[in-house]
Image (tube, helix red, strand yellow):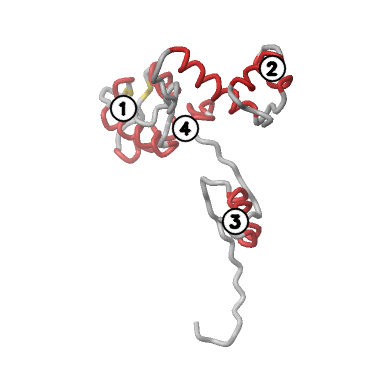
Amino acid sequence: MGSDEEVYLDVRVMCATQVDLSELCTKGEFRQDLYHRLNVLSLHIPPLRECLDGLPPLVEHFLDQASRQISCPLPTLAPAVLDKLSHYHWPGNVRQLENVLFQAVSLCDGGMVKAEHIRLPDYGAPQPLGEFSVEGGLDEILGRFEKAVLERLFHDHPSSRQLGKRLGVSHTTIANKLRQHRLGKE
């Protein structure tokens, strides 16, 4: 600091984000030059809920880690535990799994983690209809749902033939539905 001499530094910057920076660049909300400096190697790490086939080794690892921290013998798992863990949506990702298993090891007695030792909050559970409104009569609800489905799929299937094939109905039916809901070409 304050010197006129140059000092050589060999630095790597690692950063993580949950937003698509390239999309922000196109919107002008993130500097393109900075994006290209940072985007040397991009890795997509899927959330736990998308790769539950790797759950058993993670469970074993976290059980071992928790038993070492608590200084207790490594507990065994009741068969229902893995089933319960694999049917959860894991909004807190791997850290949540680690904490849930630490708590389970702390609660278990007799050297076996049982399903009742696994405490999983139900917040953040995906709702079957999401934010979809169920106000009004059945025809209104179905109409809104049909329009939402068509709007969502029309982007990836931009012709009545493609969309009809995707949905398993004739292109004439799709063309009529698109016209009815005022979607597509205007």
Q: Which mark is residue 169?
A: none
For label 4, the residue is 58
Mark 4: which secondary structure? helix
Instruction: Give the residue drawn at x 55%, y 23%.
Output: 147
For label 1, the residue is 119
Depth check, mark 1 against mark 2: the one in front is 2
> Around disc 4, counting alpha carbons within 10 Å, would you say few (fewer than 14), some (14 to 19), or many (20 or more)?
some
Image location (x, y in percent) of residue 78:
37, 18
Q: Verify CB contact (< 8 Å) between mark 3 and mark 4.
A: no
Q: Verify CB contact (< 8 Å) between mark 1 and mark 4.
A: no
Q: Which mark is residue 28?
A: 3
| Residue situated in front as seen by the camera: 132 or 110 | 132
Residue furthest toward the bottom? Answer: 4
The part of the image, by quadrant, that contains residue 9 is: bottom right
The residues tagged by marks 1 and 4 sit, at their Cα atoms, a distance apart of 17 Å
Q: Mark 1 vs mark 2: which is more N-terminal?
A: 1
The residues tagged by marks 1 and 2 sit, at their Cα atoms, a distance apart of 45 Å
Depth check, mark 1 against mark 3: the one in front is 3
